[in-house]
């Protein structure tokens, strides 16, 4: 069997919502050629090109880098460019927009809440006395210091972790996995001095203490960022802060 | 342009196995707490003398008490195993550039658990 030759068809049930029609969302079924090397995004592109041009969705790179094409595939948040049809064939695949986010149209969700949270944790290197001039050279870092935060820096902002998190589903004010992982990425960076500035957001009730450690954020992460680990680590260091402040009179407030 | 907000179903925790096992871990703490209450009552009865302690032991012979202890044991095991399996996430240790493998962190927890349990059993049973 040649790898590219069509081999029967596969059905996709796709969530459709049109805000201007004022209708309730519905599922629409499409039949597309089944190919061994096709992913769900290829099938959706086929629908858009050949069957129904009104289908709306986000995508860009097709190779798991840009983080645009996250969707619920059979109820599990996935990058649709990395979900192969062959893993579901011959069953029908149900495709929905990422859970826990408001739906703008069809498979497109509203990102504003996530973008705001991302910004709120100040995801950049903060120096107490401002950055030194370029002429003074760079801030050096050893490979061991880099390894401390490298995993947390791999996030592509695809928001699958927010979709997998029931805490975020129930309490949308939760800062959420990716934003906390990114805060931790900078807090652990040996060049950064901004931890105390981020603590107000991160160590609040809406921050790390809202997390009940379901752990699904790490399970669905396509980049193995492990936000659940970042959150537990942040809880540990915030607890140490608290002990230092309360039980260590001369420790002082950081 | 009104966005569509999908309500979170009440039975969200029944819809996927990882969510169900999370809920089992959370519920397990109720049984662990209930067992602690039984244990404290036992300590109180011991302080009241041998007769009170014997009455307490007799009351544990009822089938309801036995059923409670079996269920509490099952949930205590779920509680321990599920929390132990999360320790590599909570303890992210590095030696130089390498992250300490999660199997090592998990394994050392089990070794410590068995060692402490064996020590406690030895303390109780030696007499």
Image (cartoon, coloured by chain):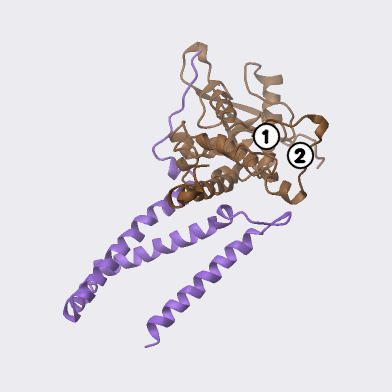
- Horizontally, is A179 left or right of A63 in the view? left
Is A178 positioned to the left or the right of A42 in the image? left
Q: Are marks 2 and 1 in contact (CB under 8 Å)?
A: yes
* Front one among A77 and A9: A77
Question: In which quadrant is the N terminus of chain A drawn?
Answer: top right
| Residue A181 visible, this orientation | yes
The residue at 80%/40% (across/down) is A3
Q: Is residue B124 left or right of residue A142?
A: left
Judging by colour alone, the chain drawn in brown in this rendered image is A
What residue is shown with label 1?
A: A125
In this rendering, position of residue B97 left or right of residue A103: right
What colour is chain B? Answer: purple
Q: Is residue A76 visible?
A: no
Residue A139 disc label: 2
The residue lying toward the viewer, choosing from A186 and B19, is A186
Query: Regarding mark 1 in the picture, which secondary structure is present there?
Result: loop
Spatial CA span between label 2 and label 1 = 11 Å
Residue A121: x and y in percent read 57, 32
Q: Is residue B88 above or below residue A172?
A: below
Q: Residue at x 44, y 59 (%)?
A: B79
């Amino acid at each position: 069997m040649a790898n590219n030759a069509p081999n029967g068809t596969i059905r996709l049930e796709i969530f459709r919502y049109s805000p201007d029609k004022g209708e309730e969302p519905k599922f629409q079924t499409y039949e597309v050629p089944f190919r061994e090397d096709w992913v769900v995004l290829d099938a959706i592109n086929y629908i858009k090109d050949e069957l129904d041009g009104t289908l709306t969705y986000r995508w860009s790179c097709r190779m798991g880098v840009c983080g645009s094409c996250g969707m619920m595939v059979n109820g599990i948040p996935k990058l649709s460019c990395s979900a192969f049809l062959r893993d579901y064939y011959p069953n029908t695949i149900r495709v929905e927009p990422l859970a826990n986010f408001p739906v703008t149209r069809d498979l497109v969700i509203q990102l504003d809440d996530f973008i705001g949270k991302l910004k709120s944790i100040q995801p950049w290197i903060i120096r107490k006395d401002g950055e030194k001039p370029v002429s003074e050279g760079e801030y050096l870092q050893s490979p061991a210091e880099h390894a401390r935060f490298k995993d947390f820096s791999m996030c592509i902002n695809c928001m699958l972790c927010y979709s997998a998190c029931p805490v975020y589903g129930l309490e949308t004010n939760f800062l959420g996995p990716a934003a906390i992982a990114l805060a931790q990425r900078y807090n652990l960076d040996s060049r950064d001095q901004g931890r105390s500035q981020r603590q107000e957001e991160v160590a609040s009730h809406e921050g790390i203490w809202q997390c009940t450690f379901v752990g699904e954020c790490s399970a669905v992460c396509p980049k193995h960022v492990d936000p659940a680990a970042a959150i537990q680590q942040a809880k540990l260091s915030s607890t140490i802060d608290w002990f230092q402040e309360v039980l260590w009179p001369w420790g002082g407030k950081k | 342009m009104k966005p569509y907000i999908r309500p979170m179903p009440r039975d969200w925790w029944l819809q996927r196995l990882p969510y169900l096992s999370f809920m089992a871990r959370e519920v397990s703490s109720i049984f662990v707490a209930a067992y602690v209450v039984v244990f404290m009552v036992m300590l109180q009865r011991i302080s009241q003398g041998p007769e009170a302690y014997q009455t307490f032991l007799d009351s544990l012979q009822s089938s309801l008490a036995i059923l409670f202890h079996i269920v509490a044991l099952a949930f205590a095991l779920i509680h321990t195993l599920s929390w132990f399996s999360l320790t590599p996430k909570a303890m992210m240790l590095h030696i130089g550039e390498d992250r300490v493998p999660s199997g090592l962190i998990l394994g050392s927890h089990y070794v410590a658990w068995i060692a402490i349990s064996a020590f406690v059993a030895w303390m109780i049973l030696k007499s």
